[in-house]
Image (cartoon, helix red, strand yellow):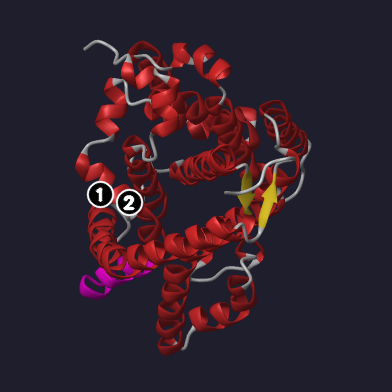
């Protein structure tokens, strides 16, 4: 199949608001997370936790792309509108699932309830990564993302007035994080490595937004490049435990994140076999519901164990828990997440149109 010239056009990219292949990538990533938690001794599940770092790269790319396009369209970035969109997209289902976990933990009246009570101050303030063990410890990544959402848009609005300053800011943040990462001797939860993927995603967004850099990245937007990068990524994932033992945990994460970053251009422009495969509707369906699936994964598996007590971790528990999570997440997505997110987008648009909470570029007034 020939590469699509239209898909490689920078103007087309700037006008494209949705990249279905990224949802397909989300679907694979959430399955990897389920696999590492519930797959038992299944082959290839040990490094499934790397799926979280895919989410980090995607989040950094998407929020920065929105900020860049808003600045180009209006001459300013409305921080208030940004936080409204993020809050109405992420918080409602987060707190809904939190309440469900609290209720179930209360009725268990065991260690789960004690742990959730201790973790609650952290859960309610999005300091999840600093909470101790709990039935909802998997939300540590949400704490990481929210801190990035608070800091990066502010830095972007204050210092990202030109393409050069945006690139410099992203590279500076990436470099500082990399130095801290390589020289870090702290325990896992307190190292800066999880911010590497978020900043890398932002850097990719800044690069793709520039016509000059976009043209120089065309070599990554081919079937051959996508295949090579995907193959190396697969090997790095499958042999992750070996690489981690010899090269260290930080190196495993950094290289994995960089490979995801190199793969992104071929997925975004929708011109390769891989991007079309990831845009397969069932994968997109799962990817769109991956956030809620991630939040309810423990409860979904507990529901399966309630019906089949004594079941060991392995393929049946993994796939049945994944299916239950998808069913529940679909209900949340259709009747809770999406309606509130749409309302939030309307609210954010009204705020943006009014210029409220805006950080303006010099000499430019909002229309």
User: Magenta span has 304?
Assistant: yes
Circle 1: element type: helix
Pick the front one: 322 or 270: 270
Does 141 appear above or below 93?
Answer: above
Please say if 225 is above or below 361: above
Q: Say whether marks 2 and 1 touch (CB < 8 Å).
A: yes
Circle number at residue 288:
2
Image coordinates of residue 354 in percent, x first then y, are 57, 60
Q: Is residue 208 above or below residue 315?
A: above
Left-right relation of 283 to 268 = left
Q: Nearer the viewer, residue 110 or 217?
A: 217
| Residue picked out by circle 1 | 285
In the rendered structure, find residue 49 and report the number of the disc placed on it: none
Magenta-colored stretch includes residue 132: no
Q: Who's the residue at 27% across and 44% down the image?
A: 284
Q: Position of residue 273 (x, y in %)?
A: 27, 21
Q: Residue at x 33, y 48 (%)?
A: 287
- Answer whether residue 234 is visible to the viewer in this image: no
How far apart marks 2 and 1 lie (CA) works out to 5 Å
Local packing at callout 2 (Cα closer than 10 Å; few below 14, some 14-19, many 20+) is some
Q: Residue at x 59, y 41 (%)?
A: 71
Looking at the image, which residue is at 55% across and 62% down? 351
Residue 117 in the image: state x and y as whole percent. 58, 82
Mark 1 surroundings within 10 Å by alpha-carbon count, few (fewer than 14), some (14 through 19), many (20 or more): some
Look at the image and give the residue range highlighted in magenta.
Answer: 298-311
Q: Is residue 97 above or below residue 265?
A: below
Can I make out residue 365 in this image? yes
């Amino acid at each position: 199949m020939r590469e699509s010239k239209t898909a490689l056009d920078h103007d087309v990219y700037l006008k494209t608001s949705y990249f279905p292949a990224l949802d397909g990538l989300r679907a694979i990533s959430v399955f990897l997370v389920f696999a590492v938690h519930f797959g038992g001794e299944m082959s290839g599940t040990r490094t499934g936790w790397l799926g979280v770092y895919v989410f980090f790269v995607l989040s950094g790319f998407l929020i920065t792309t929105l900020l860049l396009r808003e600045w180009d369209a209006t001459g300013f970035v409305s921080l208030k509108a940004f936080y409204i969109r993020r809050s109405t997209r992420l918080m409602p289902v987060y707190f809904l699932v939190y309440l469900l976990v609290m209720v179930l933990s209360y009725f268990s009246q065991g260690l789960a309830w004690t742990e959730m009570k201790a973790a609650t101050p952290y859960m309610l303030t999005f300091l999840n990564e600093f909470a101790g063990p709990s039935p909802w410890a998997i939300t540590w990544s949400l704490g990481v993302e929210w801190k990035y959402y608070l800091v990066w848009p502010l830095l972007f609005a204050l210092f990202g007035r030109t393409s050069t300053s945006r690139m410099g800011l992203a590279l500076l943040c990436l470099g500082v994080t990399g130095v801290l990462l390589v020289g870090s001797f702290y325990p896992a939860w307190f190292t800066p490595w999880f911010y590497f993927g978020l900043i890398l995603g932002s850097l990719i967004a800044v690069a793709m937004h520039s016509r000059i850099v976009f043209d120089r990245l065309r070599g990554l937007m081919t079937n051959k490049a996508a295949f090579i990068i995907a193959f190396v990524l697969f090997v790095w994932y499958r042999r992750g435990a070996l690489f981690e033992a010899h090269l260290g945990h930080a190196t495993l994460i950094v290289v994995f994140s960089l490979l995801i970053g190199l793969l992104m251009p071929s997925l975004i422009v929708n011109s390769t076999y891989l991007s079309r495969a990831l845009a397969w509707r069932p994968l997109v369906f799962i990817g769109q519901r991956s956030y809620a699936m991630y939040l309810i994964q423990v409860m979904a598996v507990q529901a399966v164990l309630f019906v089949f007590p004594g079941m060991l971790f392995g393929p049946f528990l993994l796939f049945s828990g994944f299916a239950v999570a998808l069913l529940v997440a679909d209900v949340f997505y259709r009747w809770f997440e999406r309606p509130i997110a749409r309302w939030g987008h309307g609210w954010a648009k009204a705020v943006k149109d009014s210029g409220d909470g805006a950080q303006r570029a010099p000499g430019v007034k909002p229309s």
